[in-house]
Amino acid sequence: MTDPYADQSASLTSPASGAFAIEPHDANALPLTTRALYVGIGGDLVVEMQWGAVVSFANVPDGALLPVRVDKVLAATTAASIVGLV
């Protein structure tokens, strides 16, 4: 398939070009730092940000798209069906 944008540089405001399922875990880092997280089933989301701070997002609704760059989604997370967008 031809990509009319192949010669354009990707930036953080560009659409995601890849995605992966996330299983929350305290020790395992994500395979890539995200540009955003999609939360399929809402709840609390506890993440380690790219620069190392641990942040809790309370009551994230179903279907939320959070533009956050994270390295880990921690086990204290109650949200589910989380997808990392890169």
Image (tube, rainbow, N blue to C red):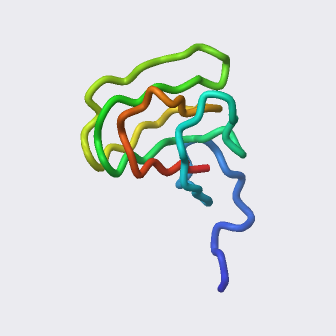
Residue 49 higher or lower than 81, as above or below: above
Q: Residue at x 60, y 41 (%)?
A: 34
Residue 1 higher or lower than 53, as above or below: below
Quarter location, residue 12: top right
Q: Residue at x 70, y 44 (%)?
A: 32
Q: Residue at x 29, y 41 (%)?
A: 42
Instruction: Indicate the position of residue 60 as horizontal and vertical percent values.
Output: 29, 34
Q: Residue furthest top?
A: 53
Residue 73 higher or lower than 80, as above or below: above
Q: Is residue 57 left or right of residue 70?
A: left
Q: Nearer the viewer, residue 63 or 78?
A: 78
Q: How many marks?
A: 0
Instruction: Indicate the position of residue 9 as horizontal and vertical percent values.
Output: 72, 52
Q: Quadrant of the N terminus?
A: bottom right
Instruction: Indicate the position of residue 6 as horizontal and vertical percent values.
Output: 71, 67
Q: Nearer the viewer, residue 1 or 80?
A: 80
Q: Is residue 85 left or right of residue 52?
A: left
Q: Is residue 27 left or right of residue 60?
A: right
Residue 15 higher or lower than 29, as above or below: below
Instruction: Indicate the position of residue 82 as horizontal and vertical percent values.
Output: 45, 48
Q: Residue at x 48, y 17 (%)?
A: 55
